[in-house]
Image: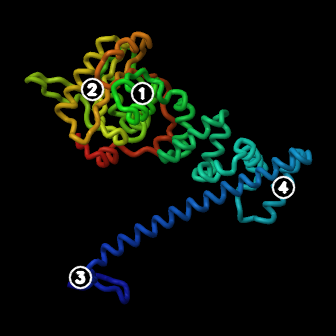
Amino acid sequence: MDEPFKQKGQQPAAQLPAGYAELLESLKARIREAQVRAALSVNRELVLLYWHIGREILQRQEREGWGAKVIDRLARDLRREFPDMKGFSPRNLKYMRAFAEAWSDEQIVQEALAQITWYHNITLLEKVKEPAERLWYVQQTLEHGWSRNVLVHQIESKLYQRQGKAITNFERTLPAPQSDLARSLIKDPYVFDFLSLGPGAQERDLERALLNHVRDFLLELGKGFAFVGSQYRLDVGGEEFYIDLLFYQLRLRCFVVIDLKIGEFKPEYAGKMNFYLSAVDDLLRHPEDRPSIGLILCKSQNRLVAEYALRDVSKPMGVATYRLTEALPADLQENLPSIEELKKELGYGG
């Protein structure tokens, strides 16, 4: 049999020294990391450059009364001097000016805004008016690695206004650090704009629809939710009980039980959730896990009724609503993992 083809001077695999494969993988990983750092460095310098250009334009206009036509002339001159550089269009120079006007503190620009792309920053300028809200979206983008399309979706679904708005008893049932984090992760309402359910839909229809769109569901839940199972079976005293949806929250280090309701919240739902949480803590919780948390998701709720229902319940839980609206933009789907990738990552074979 002929020897397999190899480049001149290349050793056959059998003759490679011990540890060569490990060295190759290590070097490839190091090169990829360097490429990422280089790309981030280029982006950082570009955003800082744009901010400085915008600040110069802004200061000249304020101090010397330059008109808007100066920007058009400046764009032509810069493009003539730097023909290989993109980004010196009149429109982009106006974005630079607006960017500098929106963010006067250079330290914030260096520490946060320069860590996201210029297109992320333009999106925030166009779609978010309040500085505190803009900065919150910047921090969330950095933490979650949102693409620009995902950022647009989160802004348009008003995530900032919904975050931490669910009714909970976390302050009374969880220690301070965990209760604050848990409250920040639970929102109200949840926006299931990737679903379309008829007026006669039941809880199982809602559950099946969410599972059929598990990527979108996890995006809406937020970072750190790992899917464990649906209709998760619990054996308590020889009787079988089934949890609608069971997750594990990696940041909270605890199980999260979700009970789906197609109608309005009722006080008895809290008692049922309290039972589920007791069972999960006894049957599934590991010694290093923190107390399990429950989330009752309803079509609607009377907030005062929900507050009364949770007031004296011993287990940590929240009540939130969900909203069904229009479908997600098609281009958002490209930025989400496939169901097969998600199942592989979570080790879920069902």
Q: Which mark is residue 14?
A: 3
Which badge, 2 or 4, is on the more N-terminal residue? Answer: 4
Which badge, 4 or 3, is on the more N-terminal residue? Answer: 3
Q: Secondary structure at mark 1?
A: loop
How far apart are the alpha carbons under marks 2 and 3?
A: 54 Å
Which mark is nearer the camera, 2 or 3? Answer: 2
User: Residue 210 placed where, x, y %?
Assistant: 35, 30
Quadrant housing residue 233 = top left
User: Residue 268 placed where, x, y %?
Assistant: 29, 12
Quadrant housing residue 52 = bottom right
User: Residue 71 placed where, x, y %?
Assistant: 84, 50
How far apart are the alpha carbons under marks 2 and 4?
A: 61 Å
Residue, disc 2:
244
Residue, disc 1:
195
Identify residue type, mark 2.
Asp
Which mark is nearer the camera, 4 or 1? Answer: 4
In the displayed image of the protein, which residue is found farthest to the bottom? 9
How far apart are the alpha carbons under marks 1 and 2?
A: 17 Å
- Colouring used for the render: rainbow
Which badge, 2 or 3, is on the more N-terminal residue? Answer: 3
Q: Nearer the viewer, residue 249 or 262?
A: 249
Q: Secondary structure at mark 4?
A: helix
Assess whether mark 3 and mark 4 are in contact (beta carbons under 8 angstroms).
no
Residue, disc 4:
74
Identify residue type, mark 3.
Ala
Is 289 positioned to the left or the right of 9 in the image?
A: left
